[in-house]
Image (cartoon, rainbow, N blue to C red):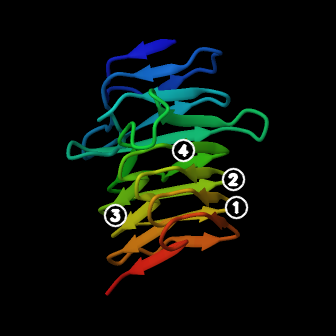
Amino acid sequence: GIVLNGGNITGTDKVWYQTTYDYILLGSINIHGGWSASRRLTIEPGNTIKSIEGVSINASSGSGYGELYAIGTAMLPIKFTSWNGNQGGWNGIEVRYSASFQNPSVFDYCIIENANTQNILVAEGGNAIILNSSLQNAIQDGIVFNESKGQIETSLLQNNGRHGVFLTGTSTPLISNNNFLNNLSYPLFINTP
């Protein structure tokens, strides 16, 4: 595989090109371009990204704005999973903050699985679009929207330890045409004021 120790994507946009080898993350990836610009990580179709325990991929952080584009195809989906193959084996994907000059993070034809608390956290004004994807086998939730926006459509949320989708705060995502299977508590849980 292609082993990455983690680090920051700050100076220029990056692409993880299609390869038959797995990308193996030994440390968290932080995508941000400061507060006046946004940086993007694009992951090409067919890639598998495996992360060890405690590792996450973070689009935007306390240091600025960032975008993650993981756009697969029906024949070549992109897979995010744990290195050890176990539920809870990595910390998932976080999408935070947004600005007028920033595009939302996009996940299309992705399999995102085996994360610790949730497979995807969209928080603090973050914006993410999830299409044609599977969010499965998280310790708690398939996806959490916390004080954020975005959309999740034509996706499968299954076998998560708590909820398929968890909305909290003033979150306003568009949720339509999804399938919810075997999530232990609720398919969609809304905890808003």
* Residue located beneath label 4 in the image: 112
For the residue marked with disc 1, what is the amino acid?
Answer: Thr
Tag of residue 132: 2
For the residue marked with disc 3, what is the amino acid?
Answer: Gly
Distance between the alpha carbons at the discs numbered 2 and 1: 5 Å
For the residue marked with disc 4, what is the amino acid?
Answer: Ile
Q: Point out the tag, 2 or 1, that comes first from the N-terminus.
A: 2
124 vs 84, nearest the viewer: 84
* Residue located beneath label 1 in the image: 154
Instruction: Report whether residue 47 is seen.
Output: yes
Query: With 97 as the anchor, is 105 left or right in this view?
Result: right
Distance between the alpha carbons at the discs numbered 2 and 3: 23 Å
User: Is there a contact, CB below 8 Å, between mark 1 and mark 4?
Assistant: no
Residue at disc 2, secondary structure: loop
For the residue marked with disc 2, what is the amino acid?
Answer: Asn
> Split into 4 quadrants, where in the image is the C terminus?
bottom left
* Residue located beneath label 3 in the image: 125
Q: Point out the tag, 2 or 4, that comes first from the N-terminus.
A: 4
Q: Point out the tag, 4 or 3, that comes first from the N-terminus.
A: 4
Query: With 65 as the anchor, is 85 left or right in this view?
Result: right
Mark closer to the observer (2, 3): 2
Distance between the alpha carbons at the discs numbered 2 and 4: 11 Å
User: Is there a contact, CB below 8 Å, between mark 2 and mark 1?
Assistant: yes
14 vs 84, nearest the viewer: 84
Label 4 CA crowd tier, 10 Å (few <14, some 14–19, many 20+): many
Q: Point out the tag, 2 or 3, that comes first from the N-terminus.
A: 3
Question: Residue placed at 62% from the left, 51% from the top?
Answer: 134
Residue at disc 3, secondary structure: loop
